[in-house]
Amino acid sequence: MTLKNSTILFVVFLMFKSYSGYGQQQPLTPDYKESQNWIALPQMEDPADVVPSESDFTNNQENAKVDVFYIHPTTALGLLKVKNADLNTKRFNKRSDFVIMNQASVFNGSCKVYAPRYRQVSLGTFLKKQSHKNRTEVFNLAYKDVKNAFEYYLKNYNNGRPIIIAGHSQGSYHGLRLIEEYFEGKPLFKKLVAAYLIGNASAIPEDKFKKSFKDIQPCSSALQTGCIISFNTHGGKIKKKPPFYFRNDLMFYGKYGEKFESNAQKKFVGTNPLTWTMDEAYAHYDLNLGGTKFVRKSKKFKKIDKNVIDGQLENGILRVGKIKKSGYKAFILKDYHVFEYNLYYSNIRKNVAERVDAYFKQHNGAGIGNTR
């Protein structure tokens, strides 16, 4: 079977396999007093507690002095509907659980992990034009849940502790809105260690920082705090066009919920997770401290593969070469979007610890980061 035919079959599979699970009416609003509406909480056993079993990493949430509020990516993979997912759909929840294990667990050496379930938008919603009559409504409903979960977290769990905002893909998209509403120009900015908004669903154009942010800037060094780390990983030659989500008209400006603005032809920003700079110089495989394979079961979450991938920023895209280990096959057409936390797992984990240490030193406190 050719790559083209297999890709078509995969798309057809998504269209029909994930058609259900959205409901005919608006799904019920989650109550964040209920633990069932959280994928991860420090006080319960959950997927964010796991570490690769063959590594020397440890789950240090019990002693961590920083929180991470983590927003999961799209796990409602239907392409036909512009809808919000029903949180009673076991298929979506199961996917969210193993995604949290692969991604949010990277923070458990230095942070207590809080990860809400929310009425995410379907994958197909991202592919529709801004003129679609329901598009803005479903995006805003998903963000409303994230916002409600964050406010519940602040009131009931945070207790004045420093915060990392993190996410992937759709989660990073909502995370950017959260950063602008609650941290930019607000007292809470002083509590922001950093934001890891990886694989943002529409990338982050340079003019977003010029228009919306003054306090918060892109991260350009390993120890900078109060900043945003973002990168989108893609294979292929440097001169190829960026993936479709770079050109999407998804980025809100001004008061959220009022409009979209096209990202076409814009300059984007990113941070290279191998160097933690915005430099477009090539970063060699030797800088990769270790990746983890994307798996669905904790018993298979085992090995750290060193030097698995390289990276070079080009207009905000993290261009990568050949994967040097088996088990990291590109999702579709050299797009490594799904594996962005996995490919740089050890680098991200180490950087979180170092950035947490830097935050406490900058705020006249003792460094408490834990690379394990």
Image (cartoon, rainbow, N blue to C red):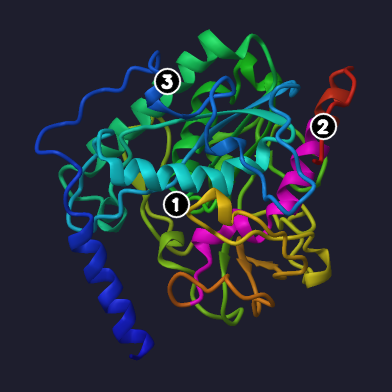
The question of residue 347 being in magenta is answered with: yes
The residue that mark 3 highlights is 35
Q: Whole-percent x and y of residue 326?
A: 62, 75
Three-letter amino acid code of the residue under disc 2? Gly
**Quarter the C terminus occupies:** top right
- Identify which amino acid the numbered label 1 is placed on: Ala
The image shows residue 165 at horizontal and vertical percentages of 59, 32
Residue located 49% across and 59% down the image: 338
Judging depth in this view, the residue of 31 and 189 nearest the camera is 31
Structural distance between the alpha carbons of marks 3 and 1: 27 Å
Q: Is 205 situated above or below 259?
A: below
Instruction: State the residue in front, 168 or 52.
Output: 52
Q: Which one is closest to the eye, mark 2 or mark 3?
A: 3
Using the numbered discs, state the Cα–Cα distance from disc 2 to disc 3 in whole angstroms: 27 Å
Classify mark 1: residues with Cα within 10 Å, few (<14), some (14-19) or many (20+): many
Q: Chief secondary structure of the magenta span?
A: helix
Q: Quadrant of residue 2?
A: bottom left
Check if residue 213 falls in the magenta segment.
Answer: no
Image coordinates of residue 150 in percent, x first then y, are: 48, 21
Quadrant of residue 232 in the image?
bottom right
Residue topped by disc 1: 201
Q: Earlier in the sequence, mark 3 or mark 1?
A: 3
Helix, strand or loop for disc 1:
loop
Question: Label 2: which residue?
Answer: 369
